[in-house]
Amino acid sequence: MLEVKCSEDYAVIKDLFTEYSQIKGAEGCFVSFDKELTDLKGFYKDGAILVGYEDGEPVGCIAIRKIDVKTCEGKRLFIKPEYRGKGYARILLNSMLEQARSLGYELFTFTTKPDVMKTAYELYKRMNFEETGFNDGVVSMRMSL
């Protein structure tokens, strides 16, 4: 069973984010990544970083970044490969949507690369995220909260 917590354990978060950054084909998702890792607290100010734990072990993450007073962006959905196929991505997404609502956001946005993250993209569609654009292999999506 996955336990999801808002986290400020930046060592764990950095490890998860760094492992995610090494997915082949995901390089374009990590623009200014060094700056983000250097100041996670500032980068996700007025947002949150959620970490999923199985039996006390960090196995996945997702983050919320403020865009403006009503809009936030989802970032860094990642499940370690050995923990995939257990429904943890859906649990993390639902936890993130709940957290975004509790922070007062009304619109949730994000981007994804379907060619690289096909399973996640299919999950987003099943969860009724709306596609708002496609540019250079990147799909923009959103959901009203």
Image: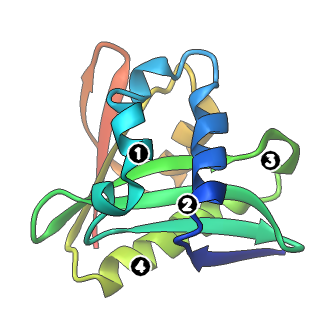
Task: Tell me the residue that label 3 is attached to.
Answer: 84
Task: Tell me the residue that label 1 is attached to.
Answer: 38
Identify the residue at horizontal 58%, vertical 48% (top origin). 14
* Residues at marks 1 and 2 touching, judged by CB atoms closer than 8 Å: no
Left/right of residue 128 with respect to residue 140 in the rendered view: right
Identify the residue at horizontal 55%, vertical 73% (top origin). 7
Query: Does residue 127 show up?
Result: no
Left/right of residue 103 with respect to residue 115 in the rendered view: left
Of the pair 74 and 41, the residue shown nearer to us: 41
Nearer to us of marks 1 and 4 is 1
Picture quadrant where residue 57 is located: bottom right
- Badge 2 amino acid: Tyr
Task: Tell me the residue that label 2 is attached to.
Answer: 10
Of the pair 128 and 143, the residue shown nearer to us: 143
Nearer to us of marks 2 and 3 is 2
The disc, 2 or 3, on the residue closer to the chain's N-terminal end is 2
Marks 3 and 4, how far apart at CA: 23 Å
Q: Which mark is residue 99?
A: 4
- Disc 3 secondary structure class: loop
The disc, 4 or 2, on the residue closer to the chain's N-terminal end is 2
Query: Does residue 135 show up?
Result: yes
The disc, 3 or 4, on the residue closer to the chain's N-terminal end is 3
- Badge 4 amino acid: Gln
The disc, 1 or 3, on the residue closer to the chain's N-terminal end is 1
- Badge 1 amino acid: Thr
Locate residue 115, reporting x and y percent.
53, 19
Locate residue 53, reporting x and y percent.
76, 69
Picture quadrant where residue 67 is located: bottom left
Marks 2 and 3, how far apart at CA: 23 Å
